[in-house]
Image: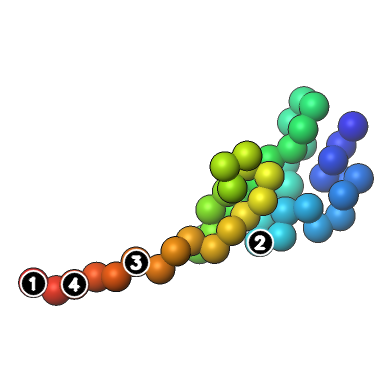
Amino acid sequence: IDECKLIPGVCTNGVCINVMGSYRCQCKPGYIASAAGTACVGMPQTLSIAL
């Protein structure tokens, strides 16, 4: 089964990659994969402090 074709828009902010028995998301810059790799979430902003 190709979940990428079966579930349109499954990897918002990324590209769906079909793998045996599942799928994973390759995320766009500024996003990271969820723990399961099946969604892309925004990366938390980091603070830089100049010393």
Q: Earlier in the sequence, mark 2 or mark 4?
A: 2
Residue 45 sits in which quadrant?
bottom left
Could you say where residue 44 lies in the image, as x and y percent from the top left?
Answer: 44, 64
Q: Which residue is mark 4?
A: 49
Residue 23 sits in which quadrant?
top right
Q: Earlier in the sequence, mark 3 or mark 2?
A: 2
Could you say where residue 7 lies in the image, as x and y percent from the top left?
Answer: 87, 49
State left or right for residue 46 relative to residue 7.
left
Q: For this rendering, which residue is in front, 5 or 37?
A: 37
Mark-to-mark CA distance, 3 and 2? 20 Å
Q: The N terminus is located in which quarter?
A: top right
Q: Earlier in the sequence, mark 3 or mark 1?
A: 3
User: Label 1 is placed on what type of residue?
Assistant: Leu
Q: Earlier in the sequence, mark 1 or mark 2?
A: 2
Q: Which residue is mark 2?
A: 13
Mark-to-mark CA distance, 1 and 2? 35 Å
Could you say where residue 19 lies in the image, as x and y percent from the top left?
Answer: 74, 31
Mark-to-mark CA distance, 4 and 1? 6 Å
How crowded is the residue under tag 4: few (<14 C-alpha within 10 Å), some, or many (20+)? Answer: few
Query: Could you tell me if the residues under marks 2 and 4 are in contact, i.e. CB atoms within 8 Å?
Result: no
Query: Could you tell me if the residues under marks 4 and 3 are in contact, i.e. CB atoms within 8 Å?
Result: no
Q: Is residue 47 above or below residue 2?
A: below
Q: Residue furthest toward the top?
A: 20
Q: Residue furthest toward the bottom?
A: 50
Q: Residue at x 53, y 53 (%)?
A: 32
- Give the label on residue 46, or none: 3
User: Label 3 is placed on what type of residue?
Assistant: Thr
Eye-nearest disc, 1 or 2? 1
Eye-nearest disc, 2 or 4? 4
Label 4 SS? loop
